[in-house]
Image (spheres, rainbow, N blue to C red):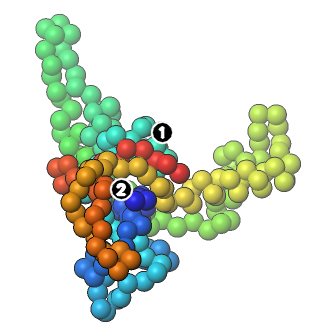
Amino acid sequence: METYLHKIKEGFILTSDEEIKEGDIQWFLHNNNIKIASEEYGIHPDCQKVIAQQDQIDFSKLSLEDQKKIGWFNIDELALKLYPVSKDTRNNITRDTNITQRRHFIEMFPKVQELLSDRMFTLEDMRAMYDISCGKIGMSGLLDQTENQQRFNLFLKSIDKTSWEVEIEMDSKSMERRYSDNKWVESDFVPKITDGKIKILKLLK
């Protein structure tokens, strides 16, 4: 089973290449909509089966490098780094004076991400920002126009990626059955669900 992680406006979702049946949640690739497969919407060839949404995904096994690639953040860890536990060095007593700040950060961080997700820039705006920050001037001085365009194109490609093939934790020797090629077959591997979540192990592509 091939599994993919997608970053959409509503948050992250996991999809698979499994056959979609009526009642399954399907993701429309062309417009990022999520709908339940039914007689009204039908089952479309450009859809993928949704097997987990944001609150059903466990990112804890992803490396820091992979976390940065997908733009996911462990809010609790960030809050602790920004507002660490303080200690009274004279008495070696832990004094957690940043509890309130950590709580506010944890509450507000998702809201900030949501507000910023709708921010739109024109291609001209992005070009101007790129040129000012790192495009025109390099370590050895001014870059020529061709090299600058190539670097800008790589930059656009890097921020445009919103889907990744991933490896997830699986359960083996499952007795779950699925209908395929006009016959019932047993699935050898199915996603392992721990505490209501599917665990992503690493990015593959």
Q: Nearer the viewer, residue 170 or 48?
A: 170
Residue at image point 20% right, 10% down: 89
- Residue under numbered circle 1: 65
Q: Which residue is mark 2?
A: 112
Q: How many badges with numbers are in the image? A: 2
What residue appears at the point 42 percent right and 44 percent down from the top-left corner?
A: 202
Disc 1 crowd rating (10 Å Cα; few below 14, some 14-19, many 20+) is: few
Task: Give me the residue at 48% from left, 39% from top.
Answer: 65
Three-letter code, disc 2: Val
Q: Are marks 1 and 2 in contact (CB under 8 Å)?
A: no
Residue 110 percent coordinates (x, y): 31, 54
Q: Can residue 114 be spotted in the picture?
A: no
Distance, label 1 to label 2, CA atoms, is 23 Å
Which quarter of the rendering shows the N terminus? bottom left
Which sits in the foreground, 10 or 88? 10
On the picture, is 68 further left or further right than 52? right
Q: Amino acid at mark 1?
A: Glu
Farthest residue in the bottom direction?
40
User: Which residue is at a point 35% across and 74% down the rendered structure image?
Assistant: 180
Q: Secondary structure at mark 1?
A: helix
